[in-house]
Amino acid sequence: MARDYTYIVARLRALEAEMPDAAWFQRLARSPVGGLVSMAREFFPGFEQAGSAAEFESGLEAERTGFMVFLAKLLGDGPEILFLLSEYDFDNLLHAWKAAKLGREPVLTGAGLVDPDSVRKAAAEGARDILPTHIGRLLEELERQIEKGDLASAQYAGEAMKYRFLLDGGSIERDRFAGLLGEPEEELYSFLEYSDYRSLLRMGLGREADLWKIDSVLSGFLLGALEESRLSFFDLSPVLYHIALRARNERAVRAVFAGRPNGLPEDLVLERVEAALAS
């Protein structure tokens, strides 16, 4: 039986109506450093976890985790929740495994499906059997890879496994992407110009683009691709749009908290905020 998304989408639409607008982010960028945390709490309750501007990542992490837990309750069991939250499980296990190899304590997110303590224990003890299948195989692959190479090579293999698990189609064939990896950068842009992704070029992606802008361009493209979902109430696309919108807002907040306390001029912080918000 198909899932009824009407109630879920209605709840997310209500949350979107309460999100800060561009003017609020601009005011945040112009605020004194000492007042950033208290201002952020107006729209990002997760910042109750941040005692100072230097702890902004803990605020963003708490905000993200709180929402993903809420979303998991809305969606319940099913393949959708595995697709949406398993990314955090892969990242947690990769980080915990690497930390265990280096003799360090990992910092894990609670936004995934698997309890972070179980991930930490599995990584430290090599206990694949206490993990669900979708990341249990990852631990096995990491151990196999480390026997053949260094830590970085094993991590790259693990990240590739994550993206294979999350792969959700697209209009460009995988072999075409693989071929572009060996070509000059200009070949990529020439190819994109005649593809469904040509708007990336109009948004600023190109050889001369500042590297810090690329993530914002990709985020804007994703939001644009999901824009039509704002008219839908009956499938998963509005959920994907909402998650992308939250990620965009998170990048804008991070631009302020990473820039202002470190002495980045206000106009440059504003430029990064506006780039993050562009869609």
Image: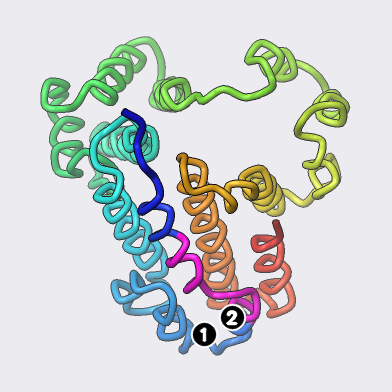
Please name which of the two marks, 1 or 2, marks the residue nearer to the observer.
Answer: 2
Q: Position of residue 117 (x, y in %)?
A: 14, 43
Q: Which residues are magenta?
A: 13-26
Magenta span includes 21: yes
On the picture, is 56 further left or further right than 215?
left
- Pointer 1: what residue? 33
On the picture, is 112 further left or further right than 115?
right
Residue at left offset 47%, top offset 74%? 18
- Pointer 2: what residue? 24
Residue at left offset 57%, top offset 87%? 31
Query: Is disc 2 placed on a helix, strand or loop?
Result: helix
Magenta part mainly helix, strand or loop? helix
Residue at left offset 24%, top offset 50%? 73
Name the amino acid type tagged 2.
Trp
Q: Position of residue 181 (x, y in %)?
A: 71, 19
Task: Give the mark nearer the N terminus: 1 vs 2.
Answer: 2
Q: Residues within 10 Å of mark 1 (few under 14, many from 20)?
A: some
Quadrant of the rendered image containing residue 60: bottom left
